[in-house]
Image (cartoon, rainbow, N blue to C red):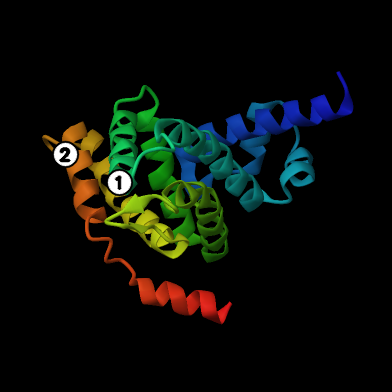
Amino acid sequence: MTRAEAKERNRRALLDAAFQVVSRDGYRATLEEIAERAGLTTGAVYSLFGSKNGLVVALVTDRLRPYYEEIEQAIPAELDLLDAVEAFARHCRRGCDAPDARSALSLQITLLDMALHDPELGERLAASVRSQESHLVALFAGRPYDGNVVTPRQARRLTTALRALFVGLGQGVPLGLAPGADEQYFADAARALASGLCLVAQDEDAQDEDAS
């Protein structure tokens, strides 16, 4: 095994161990237990991630990257905005029934708790999420809608609104707080949110472009 392969193996082992421990213990998770589960020392954590917070941020990125890669596959390039939003909504609803849905929800709630206890970690987690969401912004930007083309700023604001919608529904479904919220419900809610695209006016985008 090469040095690079060993490094990646250790990185993977720490991320997997962190998922187990952080999902259970939240901000009380210790590097000692994470390292022990991974069969490594805390020194490996500092070497690979810099700190406990660095490991947690890397864990979020590790979980989000394949999620957004799946979304890219689920939204064909030829769809207009509303059809693309509907495809995204249906993908999100199917995720609520995935085998790991409850563990993913547990981690989501745990990370929120950690962010509230540690503002510095919260800022880093928010930056990580926004970075991954840039893929979704790119998927919506440039699509036709109502005789116009969706601008990057409109796509960003729409992405923020959709995230809020689906985080809420994604928590409600497994907790029994969203009865009847099937794929069609998700699709209808998303299309209603995107319809009119009044999240930002076209002239605001023009002003941004002039300013840049």
Image x and y of residue 154, in percent = 39, 62
| In the displayed structure image, the side of residue 54 where residue 2 appears, left or right | right
Q: Is residue 6 above or below residue 119?
A: above
Q: Quadrant of the N terminus?
A: top right
Which numbered circle lies on residue 166? 1
SS category of the residue bearing label 2 = helix
Residue located 44% across and 53% down the image:
142
Residue located 88% across and 28% down the image:
3
Mark toward the viewer: 1 or 2: 2
Q: Mark 1 and mark 2: span between their CA atoms?
A: 11 Å
Q: How many C-alpha atoms fall within 10 Å of the one at disc 1: few (<14), some, or many (≥20)? A: some
Image x and y of residue 23, in percent = 46, 38
| In the displayed structure image, the side of residue 80 where residue 31 appears, left or right | right
Q: Is residue 73 above or below residue 49?
A: above
Residue located 33% across and 72% down the image:
201
Residue located 71% across and 33% down the image:
11
SS category of the residue bearing label 1 = helix
The one of 157 and 43 positioned closer to us in this rendering = 157
Image x and y of residue 4, in percent = 84, 29
| In the displayed structure image, the side of residue 155 where residue 50 appears, left or right | right
Q: How many C-alpha atoms fall within 10 Å of the one at disc 2: few (<14), some, or many (≥20)? A: some
- Amino acid type, label 2: Tyr
What residue is disc 2 on? 185
- Amino acid type, label 1: Phe
